[in-house]
Image: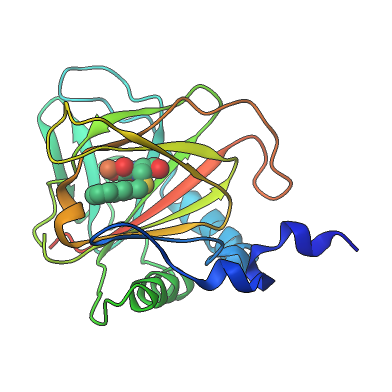
Protein backbone atom coordinates (compact mmCIF):
# COMPACT_ATOMS: atom_id res chain seq x y z
CA UNK A 1 0.00 0.00 0.00
CA UNK A 2 2.79 2.42 0.89
CA UNK A 3 5.25 0.77 -1.51
CA UNK A 4 4.94 3.57 -4.07
CA UNK A 5 6.24 6.03 -1.49
CA UNK A 6 9.57 4.21 -1.66
CA UNK A 7 9.56 3.55 -5.36
CA UNK A 8 10.91 6.51 -7.31
CA UNK A 9 10.92 4.22 -10.36
CA UNK A 10 7.18 4.64 -10.68
CA UNK A 11 7.10 8.25 -9.53
CA UNK A 12 6.38 10.53 -12.46
CA UNK A 13 8.28 13.36 -10.73
CA UNK A 14 11.43 11.23 -10.66
CA UNK A 15 11.64 11.30 -14.45
CA UNK A 16 12.42 15.01 -14.73
CA UNK A 17 16.19 15.60 -14.83
CA UNK A 18 17.33 18.12 -12.21
CA UNK A 19 20.07 20.38 -13.54
CA UNK A 20 22.73 21.01 -10.90
CA UNK A 21 24.44 23.41 -13.26
CA UNK A 22 25.37 23.37 -16.97
CA UNK A 23 26.59 19.86 -17.78
CA UNK A 24 25.59 18.22 -14.49
CA UNK A 25 22.23 16.61 -14.07
CA UNK A 26 20.65 14.38 -11.40
CA UNK A 27 18.28 11.64 -12.57
CA UNK A 28 16.50 10.72 -9.34
CA UNK A 29 15.68 7.03 -9.17
CA UNK A 30 16.77 6.32 -12.75
CA UNK A 31 18.41 2.99 -11.76
CA UNK A 32 15.82 1.99 -9.17
CA UNK A 33 13.95 -0.52 -11.34
CA UNK A 34 17.20 -2.06 -12.58
CA UNK A 35 18.81 -2.53 -9.16
CA UNK A 36 18.06 -6.27 -8.86
CA UNK A 37 19.74 -7.04 -12.20
CA UNK A 38 22.65 -4.73 -11.38
CA UNK A 39 23.09 -6.45 -8.04
CA UNK A 40 23.42 -9.91 -9.66
CA UNK A 41 25.93 -8.66 -12.25
CA UNK A 42 27.84 -6.84 -9.54
CA UNK A 43 28.26 -10.05 -7.51
CA UNK A 44 29.79 -11.77 -10.55
CA UNK A 45 32.19 -8.86 -11.18
CA UNK A 46 33.27 -8.80 -7.52
CA UNK A 47 33.92 -12.57 -7.60
CA UNK A 48 36.31 -12.09 -10.55
CA UNK A 49 37.93 -8.84 -9.34
CA UNK A 50 37.55 -8.42 -5.56
CA UNK A 51 37.18 -5.06 -3.87
CA UNK A 52 40.43 -3.81 -2.34
CA UNK A 53 41.69 -0.74 -0.52
CA UNK A 54 43.98 1.05 -2.96
CA UNK A 55 46.90 3.02 -1.58
CA UNK A 56 47.24 6.71 -2.45
CA UNK A 57 50.53 7.95 -3.98
CA UNK A 58 51.28 9.23 -0.46
CA UNK A 59 51.02 5.67 0.87
CA UNK A 60 47.69 5.85 2.73
CA UNK A 61 45.05 3.16 2.17
CA UNK A 62 41.76 4.64 0.97
CA UNK A 63 38.72 4.15 3.22
CA UNK A 64 36.68 3.29 0.14
CA UNK A 65 37.20 -0.20 -1.36
CA UNK A 66 37.57 -0.29 -5.14
CA UNK A 67 37.51 -2.52 -8.21
CA UNK A 68 36.65 -2.16 -11.91
CA UNK A 69 35.01 -3.76 -14.88
CA UNK A 70 35.38 -2.89 -18.55
CA UNK A 71 38.38 -2.65 -20.89
CA UNK A 72 40.16 -0.24 -18.53
CA UNK A 73 40.23 0.10 -14.76
CA UNK A 74 41.40 2.89 -12.47
CA UNK A 75 44.15 2.08 -9.97
CA UNK A 76 46.23 3.99 -7.46
CA UNK A 77 49.48 3.01 -5.78
CA UNK A 78 52.81 4.54 -4.72
CA UNK A 79 53.55 5.23 -8.41
CA UNK A 80 50.39 7.36 -8.86
CA UNK A 81 46.93 7.19 -10.43
CA UNK A 82 46.32 5.57 -13.81
CA UNK A 83 44.11 3.34 -15.92
CA UNK A 84 45.27 -0.22 -16.62
CA UNK A 85 43.96 -2.99 -18.89
CA UNK A 86 44.58 -5.68 -16.29
CA UNK A 87 43.90 -6.08 -12.59
CA UNK A 88 47.22 -5.76 -10.73
CA UNK A 89 45.92 -8.26 -8.12
CA UNK A 90 45.39 -11.11 -10.60
CA UNK A 91 47.38 -10.01 -13.64
CA UNK A 92 44.28 -10.80 -15.75
CA UNK A 93 42.07 -8.44 -17.74
CA UNK A 94 39.40 -6.64 -15.71
CA UNK A 95 36.04 -8.46 -15.96
CA UNK A 96 34.04 -7.26 -18.96
CA UNK A 97 31.43 -4.58 -18.36
CA UNK A 98 28.08 -6.41 -18.02
CA UNK A 99 25.63 -5.37 -20.76
CA UNK A 100 23.12 -4.24 -18.11
CA UNK A 101 25.75 -1.81 -16.72
CA UNK A 102 26.62 -0.45 -20.14
CA UNK A 103 22.95 -0.07 -21.13
CA UNK A 104 22.14 1.85 -17.95
CA UNK A 105 25.05 4.27 -18.45
CA UNK A 106 24.19 4.90 -22.10
CA UNK A 107 20.45 5.32 -21.31
CA UNK A 108 21.19 7.78 -18.50
CA UNK A 109 23.50 9.86 -20.69
CA UNK A 110 20.83 9.90 -23.41
CA UNK A 111 18.22 11.04 -20.84
CA UNK A 112 20.59 13.90 -19.98
CA UNK A 113 20.88 14.86 -23.64
CA UNK A 114 24.19 13.15 -24.49
CA UNK A 115 23.69 10.88 -27.49
CA UNK A 116 27.13 9.35 -27.99
CA UNK A 117 28.39 8.09 -24.63
CA UNK A 118 30.59 4.99 -25.01
CA UNK A 119 32.15 4.15 -21.63
CA UNK A 120 35.13 1.76 -21.61
CA UNK A 121 35.67 1.81 -17.83
CA UNK A 122 33.41 1.28 -14.82
CA UNK A 123 34.96 2.09 -11.46
CA UNK A 124 33.20 0.44 -8.53
CA UNK A 125 33.49 2.02 -5.09
CA UNK A 126 32.16 0.45 -1.89
CA UNK A 127 31.57 2.63 1.17
CA UNK A 128 30.95 1.18 4.61
CA UNK A 129 29.92 3.50 7.48
CA UNK A 130 32.73 6.00 8.06
CA UNK A 131 34.24 5.62 4.58
CA UNK A 132 34.56 8.86 2.59
CA UNK A 133 36.19 10.47 -0.40
CA UNK A 134 37.96 13.79 0.06
CA UNK A 135 37.54 16.58 -2.52
CA UNK A 136 39.30 15.70 -5.78
CA UNK A 137 39.09 16.03 -9.55
CA UNK A 138 38.83 13.13 -12.01
CA UNK A 139 41.51 13.93 -14.57
CA UNK A 140 43.06 10.57 -15.45
CA UNK A 141 40.64 9.89 -18.31
CA UNK A 142 41.72 10.62 -21.85
CA UNK A 143 38.33 11.92 -22.98
CA UNK A 144 37.35 15.08 -21.13
CA UNK A 145 34.65 15.77 -23.74
CA UNK A 146 32.77 12.66 -22.56
CA UNK A 147 30.74 12.78 -19.33
CA UNK A 148 31.06 10.60 -16.26
CA UNK A 149 27.87 8.79 -15.26
CA UNK A 150 27.52 7.76 -11.61
CA UNK A 151 25.02 5.30 -10.12
CA UNK A 152 24.29 5.15 -6.38
CA UNK A 153 23.12 1.89 -4.79
CA UNK A 154 22.47 1.04 -1.15
CA UNK A 155 22.88 3.41 1.80
CA UNK A 156 22.38 7.15 1.21
CA UNK A 157 25.37 9.49 1.01
CA UNK A 158 26.03 13.21 1.02
CA UNK A 159 27.88 14.17 -2.13
CA UNK A 160 30.10 17.26 -2.06
CA UNK A 161 29.89 19.31 -5.21
CA UNK A 162 32.55 21.98 -5.53
CA UNK A 163 33.94 24.06 -8.36
CA UNK A 164 36.97 24.33 -10.65
CA UNK A 165 39.18 25.32 -7.68
CA UNK A 166 39.65 23.06 -4.66
CA UNK A 167 38.93 26.05 -2.42
CA UNK A 168 35.57 26.74 -4.10
CA UNK A 169 32.66 26.36 -1.71
CA UNK A 170 31.12 22.87 -1.97
CA UNK A 171 27.37 22.26 -2.06
CA UNK A 172 25.91 19.19 -0.39
CA UNK A 173 23.78 16.96 -2.60
CA UNK A 174 22.08 13.94 -0.97
CA UNK A 175 22.22 10.82 -3.16
CA UNK A 176 20.08 7.76 -2.48
CA UNK A 177 19.67 4.23 -3.83
CA UNK A 178 18.80 4.37 -7.52
CA UNK A 179 19.98 7.92 -8.21
CA UNK A 180 22.05 8.47 -11.35
CA UNK A 181 24.09 11.59 -12.03
CA UNK A 182 25.52 12.65 -15.39
CA UNK A 183 28.55 14.94 -15.15
CA UNK A 184 29.69 16.55 -18.36
CA UNK A 185 30.52 19.84 -20.01
CA UNK A 186 32.06 22.47 -17.75
CA UNK A 187 31.15 20.32 -14.70
CA UNK A 188 33.45 17.50 -15.78
CA UNK A 189 36.49 18.92 -14.00
CA UNK A 190 34.83 20.21 -10.86
CA UNK A 191 36.07 19.08 -7.47
CA UNK A 192 33.83 16.59 -5.70
CA UNK A 193 33.80 14.19 -2.79
CA UNK A 194 31.64 12.15 -0.43
CA UNK A 195 31.12 12.83 3.31
CA UNK A 196 31.72 9.92 5.72
CA UNK A 197 28.91 7.41 5.25
CA UNK A 198 26.42 7.21 8.12
CA UNK A 199 25.57 3.92 9.81
CA UNK A 200 22.61 2.09 8.39
CA UNK A 201 21.23 -1.04 6.82
CA UNK A 202 19.83 -1.00 3.31
CA UNK A 203 17.18 -3.64 2.53
CA UNK A 204 18.79 -4.35 -0.83
CA UNK A 205 22.53 -3.80 -0.42
CA UNK A 206 23.11 -4.33 3.32
CA UNK A 207 25.33 -2.01 5.39
CA UNK A 208 27.09 -0.31 2.49
CA UNK A 209 26.84 2.06 -0.42
CA UNK A 210 28.04 1.01 -3.87
CA UNK A 211 28.83 3.64 -6.46
CA UNK A 212 29.40 2.79 -10.11
CA UNK A 213 31.11 5.45 -12.23
CA UNK A 214 31.21 5.02 -15.97
CA UNK A 215 34.01 6.73 -17.86
CA UNK A 216 35.54 7.03 -21.25
CA UNK A 217 39.15 6.53 -20.21
CA UNK A 218 41.00 5.38 -23.32
C1 LIG B 1 31.80 14.97 -10.98
N1 LIG B 1 33.11 8.74 -6.78
O1 LIG B 1 35.05 7.50 -8.14
S1 LIG B 1 30.31 9.68 -7.85
C2 LIG B 1 35.12 8.75 -8.07
O2 LIG B 1 30.24 8.40 -4.89
C3 LIG B 1 34.10 9.48 -7.31
O3 LIG B 1 31.91 7.08 -5.18
C4 LIG B 1 32.13 9.30 -5.91
O4 LIG B 1 34.19 10.64 -7.18
C5 LIG B 1 31.36 8.17 -5.30
O5 LIG B 1 35.98 9.42 -8.63
C6 LIG B 1 31.26 10.29 -6.55
C7 LIG B 1 30.00 11.16 -8.68
C8 LIG B 1 31.06 11.72 -9.54
C9 LIG B 1 32.04 10.96 -10.12
C10 LIG B 1 32.93 11.52 -10.97
C11 LIG B 1 32.86 12.88 -11.28
C12 LIG B 1 31.00 13.05 -9.81
C13 LIG B 1 31.88 13.64 -10.69
C14 LIG B 1 33.74 13.50 -12.18
C15 LIG B 1 33.62 14.82 -12.47
C16 LIG B 1 32.65 15.58 -11.86
FE1 LIG C 1 35.70 11.38 -8.57
Q: Quadrant of residue 146?
A: bottom left
* Picture colour scheme: rainbow
Residue found 56% across the figure and 26% down from its top? 129
Lateral position of residue 43 relative to residue 159, left or right: right
Residue found 11% across the figure and 59% down from its top? 144
Location of ligand 2 given as a quarter of the image: top left
Relative height, residue 98 to residue 184 (above, below): below
Relative height, residue 50 to residue 146 (above, below): above
Count of numbered badges drawn on the protein? 0
Q: Quadrant of residue 105?
A: bottom left
Lateral position of residue 117 relative to residue 78, left or right: right
x, y (%) of residue 6? 73, 57
x, y (%) of residue 174? 50, 42
Q: Nearer the viewer, residue 43 or 102?
A: 102
x, y (%) of residue 10? 68, 72
Q: Quadrant of the C terminus?
A: bottom left
Lateral position of residue 215 relative to residue 181, left or right: left
Q: Which residue is the extreme one toward the right?
A: 1
Residue found 15% across the figure and 56% down from its top? 186
Q: Quadrant of residue 63?
A: top left
Q: Which residue is the extreme one toward the bottom?
A: 115
Residue found 64% across the figure and 34% down from its top? 207
x, y (%) of residue 200? 67, 31
Q: Nearer the viewer, residue 110 or 68?
A: 110
Q: Nearer the viewer, residue 212 or 99?
A: 212
Q: Quadrant of the N terminus?
A: bottom right
Q: Nearer the viewer, residue 41 or 101?
A: 101
Amino acid sequence: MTAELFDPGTDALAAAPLALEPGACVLRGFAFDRAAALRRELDAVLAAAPLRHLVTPGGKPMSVATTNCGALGWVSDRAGYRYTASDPLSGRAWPPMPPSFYRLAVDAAARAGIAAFAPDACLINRYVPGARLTLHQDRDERRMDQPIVSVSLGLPAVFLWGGPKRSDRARRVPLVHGDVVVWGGPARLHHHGVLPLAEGEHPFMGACRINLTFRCAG
